[in-house]
Image (spheres, grey):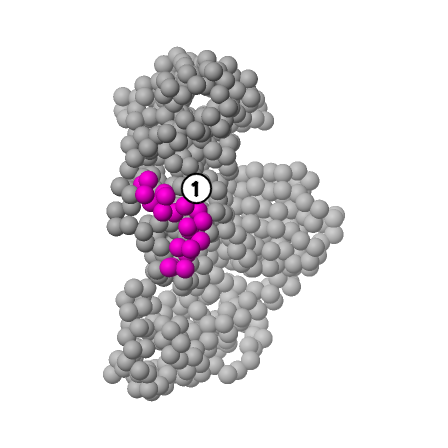
Amino acid sequence: MSLSQFLKEIYRLPDEDLEKALKLQKDLGGDIGRLLVQVGSITDGQRLEGLSSYLKIPLYEEEYPADDSLVACLEGCLDYGFLLKNHFFPLSIDHERKILSAVTSDPFNSSMPDYVVKNLGYAVQLQLAPEKVVEDLARGYLEVQERKFIPLTVEEDAEKLKEMAFEAPVITFLNSLLNKAVEMRASDIHMESAEKKHRVRFRIDGILHDIDTLEEAFYLAVVSRIKLLAELDIAEKRLPQDGKFSTRIASLFLDIRVSTLPTVNGECVVLRLLYREKVSLDLDYLGLEPDHKELAVRMIGSSYGMLLVTGPTGSGKTTTLYSMLTRLNHPDRKIITIEDPVEYQIQGINQIQVRSDIGLSFAAALRSILRHDPDIVLVGEIRDRETAEISIQSALTGHLVLSTLHTNDAPSSLFRLVEMGIEDYLLNAALVGVMAQRILRRNCPFCSRPDPGAEALLREYALHDVAEKCGHLLGDGINLQRGQGCPRCGGTGYRGRMAIFELFDYTDDLKELFLKKMSLEALRGALRERPSFRYLREDGILKVARGQTTLDEVLRVC
């Protein structure tokens, strides 16, 4: 008898409940028992009772035992993150009989029992418990380890922290934290110092989520471990520091940028996770609409001139620029980039890291690389008048220059350069075009459902006007969707991100208007006359109409 048939029989499940769970299993994968809990057919306790009867595994009823030999076993052989990931926690260990007793919420996962048998040579006796109980046991073990880290005096601080950074619980916690971050698709790990408990947060799809809290001494030890890996000064807590290290999580290689910041409550640390294999540096994967992609390809096809990508920090400008460089990267071209920092290394491109501490600024590097005969130059960011002037001169002397600027939309970039002191006639001669962008979250593909209630709100934002203007891009018409929340998206209703764009090529009619000292509003009005021009919000509403995201997301970012 199969487990699904067994559960149906023992709990007298209606056929429709079982069919619903089986459909979910086909779409999402996973244990049929857990899915029956999700659809509300049975409780988790009933699931475990059924499994206990079906697999002849007893239910967990004992208190967590304080077993010194077990703690020693955990510190030496078992990783905290590995335990949590596999829904497994050891309860006691019998060295004479070579048996490890453990509790699990997933008896079908053989990873941990196989690991124990292989690495310890012990047999495993399992008991069943709800997932929260297993997690509480593992967290309780970690808190016991945290309490071992007593507060330090100022005199012993630096040396003791260095020793603590090599303690097994610290190494284990940081490894499990990185594993969890990769599993949850986090882009950043925030470790924030507070008066009492210090907190750990992940940024997932652009939004911060609370993950854990740490006692002060243990928090300091973990921060010291991170500093050691990033080759930073452990004793220096008064000044910000920046570093990096690389690691491998499962089959993924990660470059991790580390930044520390002194605050009134202590040091905060941010780890930026850069996935070498996961980033698709290709214009085809940016989410450009066909008319926008055609225009972007035409602009980067210019033999000389300057193309700007604008937007706030974290809006995906670097990924867009790298995607353009990947398209332009041919053996018959020399490409040099100046970046702060170099986020991704691209084969066949010469990349320079800005080093302000030794005088290697954007402007200084740009002056030097022009003597190396490049065809294409990427300047990571135009921050000042000097960099802007050299970039413009480079564009006027036969180079294609790509760079970024911090403005709220595409038309504002012209006026920002004028404010920096660039003459309008030089700007007219050099500029090819401008692209503005934002990043927003995608609807989860596993739990998105029709959202007819959103149409009333979208009328307020002229959805139908946008749909009419962009009807050739909508295809099947308006299809409003919203994620309902599921295990794949962590209950948020969103999974993954996408970009929205606003771009224009700087043609003769706009140059003529600009020389007449037109206002920003006049420039926007001239752009509105173009069929292909859309504001950022309009490009977002187009994606809402297609069911790719929600209006809430569009309004959040622009």
Tell me if residue 538 comes above or below residue 25 in the rendering: above
Q: Residue at x 74, y 48 (%)?
A: 154
* Residue 65 lies in quadrant: bottom right
Give the vertical position of 471 relative to 550 (above or below).
Answer: above
In the image, residue 149 above or below residue 429: below
Q: Position of residue 448 (x, y in %)?
A: 36, 59
268 vs 445, left or right, is: right
Mark 1, residue position:
537
Q: What stretch is highlighted in magenta?
A: 451-470
Identify the residue shown where x is 56% and y is 38%.
242
Front position in the image: 96 or 116: 116
Residue drawn at point x = 29 percent, y = 43 percent: 471
> Which quadrant of the structure image shows residue 403?
top left
Q: Would residue 155 appear left or right of 374 to someone viewing this image?
A: right
Query: Does residue 122 appear left or right of residue 354 in this picture?
Result: left
Q: Position of residue 44 (x, y in %)?
A: 43, 78
> What amino acid is labelled 1 in the image?
Arg
Which quadrant holds residue 64?
bottom right
Residue drawn 41% across and 50% down? 459
Magenta stretch: dominant secondary structure = helix
Q: Residue 463 magenta-drawn? A: yes
